[in-house]
Amino acid sequence: MDARTGIGIIGAQFAGRFHAQIWETLPDAEVVAVADVSPEAREAFCRDYGSVPAYTDLTGLLADPNVEVVDVCVPNFLHAQMAIRAMETGRHVICEKPAATTLADAEQVVEVQQRTGRRYCYAEDWIFAPALVRAERIIREGGIGRPLFLKGKECHNGSHSPFAKTIEYCGGGSLIHVGIHSIGYFFHLLGMPERVTGCCNGGGADNFVHKDFEGEDWALGVLHYPNGEKALVEGNYITTGGMDDSMEAYGTEGVIKVDLTFGSPLSVFSKNGISYAVEKAEFTHGWTRPAVDENESLGYKDELTHFLDCVRNDTPQVPATTAEAGFAVLRIVEAIYRSHREERTIALT
């Protein structure tokens, strides 16, 4: 295959923009169209990433014959319906997490993918983050012995998107929005847990900080695996100072600690502040650890590179990035929520 693969991005704002930055670096891909309901977002996208056909909705994008892959970068509640429509028109799909906001919708994504035979790529960037890829290799080669207990979290000071405040649009709170990353990584590493135990804030007035969020602003889940391993996952919106992503693995013969967002080799002291340190940092005065390239360190570049190779060369996908995997990860999220509501451990097998 010689011609570049045509990428159509639906959603021209935060996720769509950093996806566009990555597509620009991949010689076998070309962003050929974008769609967004906001004229300001469309104009800014075309100004920053090149003048391409810009549509107001998915219908326009799917009518463009140059679009071969639809890159879904819209709010959570639109993920399933847009992925389904794209696959039914013969397009491959790359979809940001979560796969859907309900299990019924995620199950329909699986059904449509199987029926159409189109690629569906569940975009869990942690699976491709270089530090976590290296940690996985060490674990699989027995470097820390038999894994016993793992911890993973993504935390920051809260989403600025109005969609993240409403359960109907987001599917929940901090667990489904940010805690889902460590869940997806542990699904990749260990498979499906046999049961889960969850504890969350109740949303609204019960939240620690974000009383205007319908979903929780703090959540924990314990994943219990058939071989005895346990994993603690956390997602919260109460962490100040920038986005805090980390993973730890404790085994019979060793320990691994991975700091994805505060582990930069760069240290800067600035009296005046610098333009950017890490995502969600409130200010950049004094000492900071600025990220060198978040698109690479958080796995986004290798993720999209892998998906592009799968589409172009019909190579196997990493199993934890399929439609079935997206459904399985959402099952774990929903079970943690149910465990919290019912105050009991929930079996998944």
Image (cartoon, grey):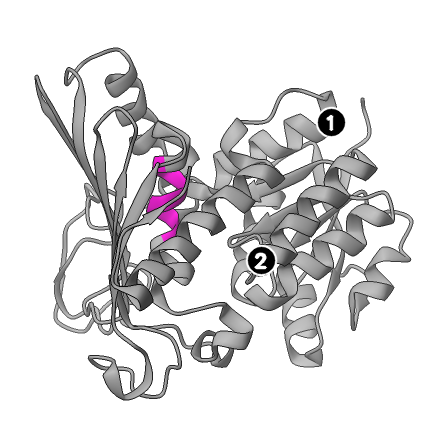
**Residue 264 % position (x, y):** 22, 44
Residue furthest toward the top? 141
Q: Residue at x 34, y 28 (%)?
A: 190
Judge whether 187 appears above or below 43 on screen: above
**Residue 202 % position (x, y):** 29, 76
Instruction: Specify start and end residues of the magenta stretch as a single range.
Output: 180-186
Inspect this view and state whether residue 315 appears.
yes
Secondary element type, mark 1: helix
Decide which of 282, 327 is in the foreground and name it.
Answer: 327
Amino acid type shown at disc 2: Ala
Q: Residue at x 82, y 30 (%)?
A: 3
**Residue 91 % position (x, y):** 81, 44
**Residue 51 % position (x, y):** 76, 61
> How far separated are the C-alphas under marks 1 and 2?
26 Å
* Residue that label 1 marks: 312
Q: Is residue 85 left or right of residue 217?
A: right
Residue 100 numbered mark, or none: 2
Secondary element type, mark 2: loop
Question: Earlier along the polypeptide chain: callout 1 or callout 2?
Answer: 2
Q: Residue at x 80, y 55 (%)?
A: 85
